[in-house]
Image (tube, helix red, strand yellow):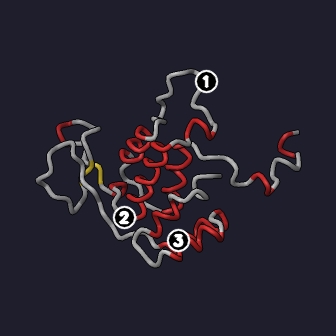
């Protein structure tokens, strides 16, 4: 049986599989411990990464191979997403106000948002940057010693958490 084979849980295979955009977005949010009141930024990120939720055109589903998801544009989208989360510039915690133009897809309104924003723009619920030490403790040995040293060598920075979330180690499972 597949699950009982020694190869199934062999440590040599851990970290070999490249995450799909869905797996990456979910793992970033989980590792960051960000409260999600507004899923629209997640859906937008999945769209930009080429894997819209329930948007696969073929009946066989999205491909699950590295060659489909590892390309320069996809990496740029992942880094951008990781930077937004790592810097605390994500509207995930914004309170949804579906009364804007009676359009449920119009945008999010933060409790302390600027009321001069046009409907549909949405508001950001910026917070402080993620604590890189807490993030590293959360992801544990998923991030290699070499990656930890590289991030530490760049000195303390508000981008340190984004570097962890955008690292090659974090993009694999």
In the picture of the structure, the residue carrying the numbered disc 2 is 88
Number of other residues with Cα within 10 Å of mark 2, as a class: few under 14, some 14 to 19, many 20 or more: many
Residue 137 in view? no
Q: Position of residue 99 (x, y in %)?
A: 21, 42
141 w.r.t. 45: above or below: below
Q: Residue at x 15, y 51 (%)?
A: 117
Number of other residues with Cα within 10 Å of mark 1, as a class: few under 14, some 14 to 19, many 20 or more: few
**Which-is-in-front pick, marks 3 and 1?**
3
Q: Residue at x 45, y 35 (%)?
A: 52
Q: Secondary structure at mark 2?
A: loop
Number of other residues with Cα within 10 Å of mark 3, as a class: few under 14, some 14 to 19, many 20 or more: many
Decide if residue 113 is on the left or right side of residue 28. left
In the picture of the structure, the residue carrying the numbered disc 3 is 151
Decide if residue 130 is on the left or right side of residue 67. left
In-front residue for pair 116/35: 116
Residue 10, labelled with which disc? none
Which numbered disc, 3 or 2, marks the residue that appears first in the sequence? 2
Q: Position of residue 98 (x, y in %)?
A: 25, 43
Which numbered disc, 1 or 2, marks the residue that appears first in the sequence? 1
Q: Position of residue 102 (x, y in %)?
A: 20, 36
Instruction: Give the spatial CA distance, label 3 vs label 2.
Output: 18 Å
22 w.r.t. 83: above or below: above
Q: Residue at x 29, y 49 (%)?
A: 96
In-front residue for pair 67/22: 67
In the picture of the structure, the residue carrying the numbered disc 1 is 60
**Which-is-in-front pick, marks 3 and 2?**
3
57 w.r.t. 83: above or below: above
Q: Quadrant of residue 12?
A: bottom right
């Amino acid at each position: 049986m597949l699950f009982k084979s020694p190869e199934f849980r062999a440590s040599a295979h851990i970290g070999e599989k490249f995450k799909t955009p869905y797996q990456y977005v979910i793992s970033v949010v989980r590792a960051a411990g960000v409260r999600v009141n507004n899923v629209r930024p997640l859906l937008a990120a999945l769209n930009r990464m080429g894997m819209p939720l329930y948007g696969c055109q073929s009946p066989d589903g999205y491909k699950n191979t590295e060659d489909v998801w590892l390309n320069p544009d996809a990496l740029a989208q992942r880094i951008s997403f990781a930077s937004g989360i790592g810097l605390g510039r994500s509207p995930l915690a914004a309170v949804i106000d579906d009364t804007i133009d009676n359009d449920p897809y119009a945008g999010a309104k933060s409790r302390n948002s600027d009321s001069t924003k046009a409907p549909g723009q949405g508001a950001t619920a910026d917070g402080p940057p993620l604590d890189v030490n807490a993030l590293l403790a959360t992801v544990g040995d998923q991030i290699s010693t070499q990656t930890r040293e590289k991030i530490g060598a760049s000195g303390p920075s508000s981008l340190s958490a984004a570097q962890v979330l955008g690292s090659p180690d974090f993009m694999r499972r």
